[in-house]
Image (tube, rainbow, N blue to C red):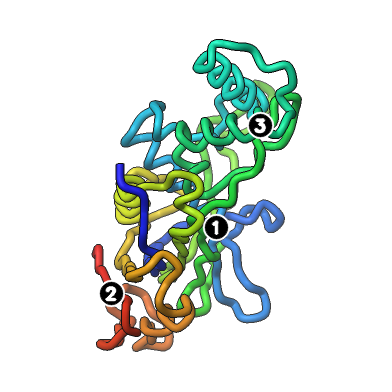
Amino acid sequence: MTEINNRYEFVMLFDVENGNPNGDPDAGNAPRMDVETGYGYITDVCLKRKIRNYVELVKGDEAPYKILIKSDRALNDKFKEAHEAVETQRGEKVKDHKAKSAVDDARQWMCKQYFDVRTFGAVMSTGDDPCGIVRGPVQLNFAKSQSPINIDELTITRQAITTVKDFNNKNTEMGQKHIIPYALYRGEGYISAALGQKVGLTEDDLEVLFDALVNLFEHDHSAARGKMSMRKLYIFKHDSVLGNAPAHTLFDTITITPKTEIPRRFTDYDITVASHLPEGVSLIEKL
């Protein structure tokens, strides 16, 4: 597998219709919103979770595409497994799993086994079997809506009653549901080839990542999230490891302008992509 030798940045445009793309537990699970501007946002953690879920769905729980951050086992158990695997490969026990050499070997093993460790990085320095810290070469910003959002709070009813006591006293139960009628979000990300080479990130890994971004919502549908669709994915590829232009200047080449006061569909926005890019940078459109 070929290691990456090019820096990348990417811009993804996706929308939601009659759904809640990322609930805030501190606000009754209502969609996240900047209270000063009224614009909606989606956390990087939410987006990374969807990428992890897609990769696991497509690749299964097999190396080198295993997923570390999930609720199957305690993390410290997985760190211990890394040290045991290194010991098996060497054919000898290591007395101190906290020794620098043991931690370095375990960290390399984790990078080879787990896709999300190679991409997003991980803090694996807990417990008696630490595996160190990996700086993730792939990072995402919070996604932000391109217009202020309107949050509707709907009252819903359910005919199935939870408790026996309540079953004898009422026919339905009430609940609340928050939705955004429509919003277009813009998310931005970075891929550092310099950091990627240190953790073994490959061109094959990037293809899996980009495939996950294109299909981010295709296997993530639920009643709560409504209709979510990836609309555009723009990838800036540099000719060098360290890059040929600042990321923000590349992001500025893509502008999104609402055509109506209250956009209600993707076509209610004008999307403009600059025809000229800095020297040494090319644009790839996946959608």
**Residue found 61% across the figure and 28% down from its top:** 162
**Measured from the top left, where is residue 163 in percent x and y?**
65, 25
- The amino acid on which the numbered mark 1 sits, given as a three-letter code, is Asp
**Measured from the top left, where is residue 36 in percent x and y?**
67, 79
281 relative position to 127: left or right: left
Q: CA distance from mark 3 to mark 2?
A: 41 Å
- The amino acid on which the numbered mark 2 sits, given as a three-letter code, is Ser
Marks 3, 1: nearer the viewer? 3
**Residue found 50% across the figure and 17% down from its top:** 89
In this figure, which residue is indicated by the disc labeled 3?
101
Choose the circle earlier in sequence order: 1 or 2.
Answer: 1
Q: CA distance from mark 3 to mark 1?
A: 33 Å
**Residue found 31% across the figure and 47% down from its top:** 2
Tell me the quarter of the image containing the C terminus.
bottom left
Which type of secondary structure does the marked residue at label 3 adopt? Answer: helix
Tell me the tag on residue 44.
1
Eyeballing the image, is 154 above or below 100?
A: below
In this figure, which residue is indicated by the disc labeled 2?
282
Which type of secondary structure does the marked residue at label 2 adopt? Answer: strand
- Whether residue 217 is visible here, answered yes or no, is no
